[in-house]
Amino acid sequence: MNPPRIVVVGAGHVGLYAALRLSKKLNRNRAEIVVIDPVPHMTYQPFLPEAAAGNISPRHAVVPLRRELKKCRIVSGEVTKVEHARKTVTIQPIDGPAYEMEYDHIIVAPGSVSRTLPIPGLSDRGIGLKTIGEAIYLRNHILDRLDVAAATPDEDVRKASLNFVFVGGGFAGIEALAEMQDVVADALKYYPELDPKEVHFILVEASNRILPEVGPEMGAYTARQLAGRGVDLRLSTFLQSCVDGRIVLSDGDTFRAETLVWTAGVKPSPMLANTDLPLGPKGHVNCLPTLQVADLETSEVWEGAWSAGDCAQVPDLTNPGGYCSPSAQHAVRQAKVLADNIAQVVLGGAPKEYRHKHVGGVAGLGINKGVAHVYGIKVKGYPAWLMHRFYHVSRIPSFNRKVRVVADWVLAFVLKRETVALGQLHSPREEFTEVTPPVALPAEKKVGAGAR
């Protein structure tokens, strides 16, 4: 008799940590663990701003699945459909035809995607910050804008190149803005043609505060710090249009900018719409505190279906009536409980409920600057920056990655960061095609009507 198959959809925080723990608790005779993801690595998203800033190598902000999950089967592909009634998933591999795979248990953890709005020009001009590719592109793009500004004789192009707009005042937006402002400040030392006063970083936030994750006092402190560094804070303001790089804000201001970073929230993966699982009003998978998928109206448990993380709506037992926030802090801890619960069910036991009181948050605001609100303790400046780094290096999976990240930090401290754009990464064949024009195929010989 074959062991039960556990399919893990998505290799983010939940998927990787759950699969890793399951592989340690259940040997191959007890369960077959299959991890399905379109990319062969897990991205440690809290390190994306540092990867974009060049503080760490982009390769060290990701965890290779095949190296870390040696006891699991890795499938490089995308799950396009889940039919739990038949206990099958439809997989579209990176190449070749789609196929179905049966399972006994499924962990639905495709995570989230950037939540965008129907703003004119956003799809053409916006840059997200959810993937390592976006982080690399953002770094190259911003440094490239400095080269453009230094070389152009056109004053309008110069101004547009030196305007950097970030939309969203949460962790991702604030950390990315602060890190990239440091990068530009460092790079300007090598651009005598540019005046630092010409550079403008603009933060657009729809609410009247930033960094709500660290509380109102630390959020206000962050706002003061950013304003003191010259950041133009536009609170209670919306982006209305960005067609052809012309930024139109709800406060009536209009200007041109060649850089628009969109970090205004996330939403569950759209893949969930192609499942027969019960979903909440915002597209999340409905779960019980045990992380079992369930119909909340009838309290019916969908046996063998589990979920957690950004894509799941998990009741917060420490806050009756509320749900766990879509944060890495909850995702990592939920993954542990989820894996333990599946192992217990496979071995004949009963699942336990997930309970974790949110301990607060830490945010980096560039080199030697940070803010933290942890267990009610408020920290700012250099100590908070150290807390931010120590916390995240402790959380990234594998000793290998911890050592590499710390080594990157040490080298950046000793040798200073690199401030060169590698824009050709995004169009590697352009030069080749310029020197190798397409060869016209010979025309087919026409055959006369009487020829045989």
Image (cartoon, rainbow, N blue to C red):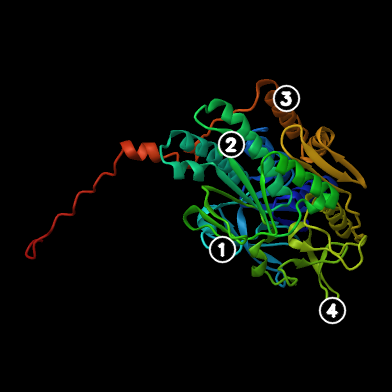
Front position among marks 4 and 3:
3
Front position among marks 2 and 1:
2
Q: What residue type is labelled 3?
A: Val
Please give the residue where the numbered disc 3 appears in the rendered image: 410
N-terminal label among 4 and 3: 4
Q: Which amino acid does label 4 sit on?
A: Thr
Image-quadrant location for residue 403? top right
Q: Residue at x 81, y 58 (%)?
A: 325
Q: In which quarter of the image is the C terminus?
A: bottom left
Give the SS element for disc 3: helix
N-terminal label among 2 and 1: 1
Residue 22: x percent and y percent?
81, 50
Give the SS element for disc 4: loop
Front position among marks 2 and 3:
2
Image-quadrant location for residue 338? bottom right
Please give the residue where the numbered disc 2 appears in the rendered image: 197
Q: Residue at x 50, y 53 (%)?
A: 245
Give the SS element for disc 2: helix
Q: Which amino acid does label 2 sit on?
A: Lys
N-terminal label among 1 and 3: 1
Query: How many residues crowd around disc 2 within 10 Å: few (fewer than 14), some, or many (20 or more)?
Result: few
Residue 143: x percent and y percent?
54, 36
Q: Residue at x 80, y 54 (%)?
A: 212
Front position among marks 1 and 3:
1
- On screen, residue 70 versus residue 26, left or right, reads left
Please give the residue where the numbered disc 1 appears in the rendered image: 119
Please give the residue where the numbered disc 4 appears in the rendered image: 298
- On screen, residue 38 versus residue 403, left or right, reads left
Rendered view: 89 above or below 216: below
Front position among marks 1 and 4:
1
